[in-house]
Image: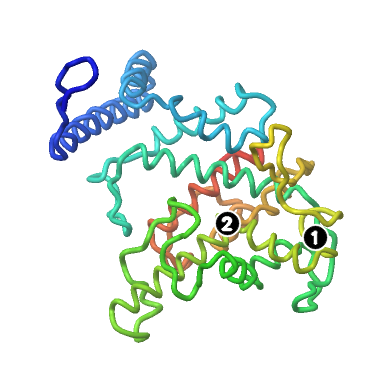
Amino acid sequence: MVNDSGYKRIRKTKEEQQLINKQVQLKLEEAIIGYQNAINQEDHRSANKFYQDICDVYPPLDFVKVWYKKYKHFYDSREDFTQDYLYVFCKALMKWQPRDKRPESRYNGTGEFKNYFWSNLNNYYTNIVKFKAAGIRNIAVVCPICNKQTQTLSTHLLNHHPELLWEQLAVMGHDIEKLYKCPLCKSHKLPQVPDPVFDGMGDPDRILFLTQNSALRKHLLSKHSPLLFEKFNDSFPEHDTMNVKPSSNYFIDDSGDNEINVYDNVEYSDPVAKLWNTNLSDIQKQILELILISKNKKIIYQPDVYNCTMEEFEDHMDDLRVKLNICGLEG
């Protein structure tokens, strides 16, 4: 093919592009491992060199605009946002491991750093959203669905009335009974190993589907809970879950381009209270109880205690560290 300048454009084959990508990935991995070793050895000069090598291959600020547009309403300035963004980047650099040095993924992922970094960003900002939501003190009310007394209506709805979310998905044209992939985002990872809890419930394909459907339900309740609250607030406007005035969960900012969450920044004086009012998983609650009650800060994975895999336990720990940091506690 010849372009307007008269020069012949040489189009790379798929194999050539894959080779280039692999070479870039290897160069990035070598720089990250060098950076980790330099930090651990307190060799700051080498750490700075490797950090620059990393940024030459994978400039993190190339993507800050995308994330800032989505979450800027949580920050006073772009500078504050960028500092948080680079904090997550540096944390990801220290925690990332190449495929041959970490447990085999259930999701058959590529193990590339860019995917790991974006996952860290997504978890970090999702936790900020949850923390802001937890900052609203819910008045003790009777749930209009089951007539049970509840102190925190939003948490009660997530734990006991997930059908609200399934109904809202149905309005959007998605049947939760038939889904195994998230129809709302691309961040959800599909489990590739059947969960033993579904043994005997059908052939292998059926068991794998049940595993993936179960994982999807947890993902939807964790990452897309505003849909559940939207459904509830539309059905019971007098029982708004977020503040004392019935309203939608979102409004459009002055530019007319961005949706902003109405959760106001109401601070608790006690950082531990902040933490307990976030959406902690059962495993995270077990860990915190062990720390607070037993005064034991050395947390060791015990499958019989936490009833999960090592990989799942580490995911819960990473998520808990982010929540601790957001609430002003040492992770």
Give the position of the N terminus as an image quadrant.
Answer: top left
Residue 117 appears in which quarter of the rendering? top left
Q: Residue at x 61, y 51 (%)?
A: 295
Q: Position of residue 107 (x, y in %)?
A: 32, 57
Residue 143 appears in which quarter of the rendering? bottom right
83 or 328, which is in the foreground? 83
Q: Position of residue 78 (x, y in %)?
A: 61, 24
Q: Position of residue 154 (x, y in %)?
A: 72, 61
Label 2 element class:
loop
- Residue 279 got which mark? none
238 over 54 or under it: above or below: below
Q: Residues within 10 Å of mark 2 (few under 14, many from 20)?
A: some
Q: Residues within 10 Å of mark 1 (few under 14, many from 20)?
A: many
Q: Which residue is drawn at 50% across and 56% down?
A: 184
Label 1 element class:
loop
In the image: residue 327, left or right of residue 59: right
Q: Which residue is drawn at 22% across and 34% down?
A: 21
Q: Position of residue 80 (x, y in %)?
A: 62, 25
In the image: residue 199, left or right of residue 85: left
310 or 54, which is in the foreground? 54
> What residue does disc 1 label?
240
Q: Looking at numbered disc 2 in the image, what kind of residue is underneath it?
A: His
Q: How many marks?
A: 2
- Residue 224 got which mark? 2
In space, the residues marked 2 and 1 are separated at their CA atoms by: 18 Å
**Mark 2 / mark 1, whichever is N-terminal:** 2
Q: Looking at numbered disc 1 in the image, what kind of residue is underneath it?
A: Asp
Give the position of the C terminus as an image quadrant.
Answer: top right
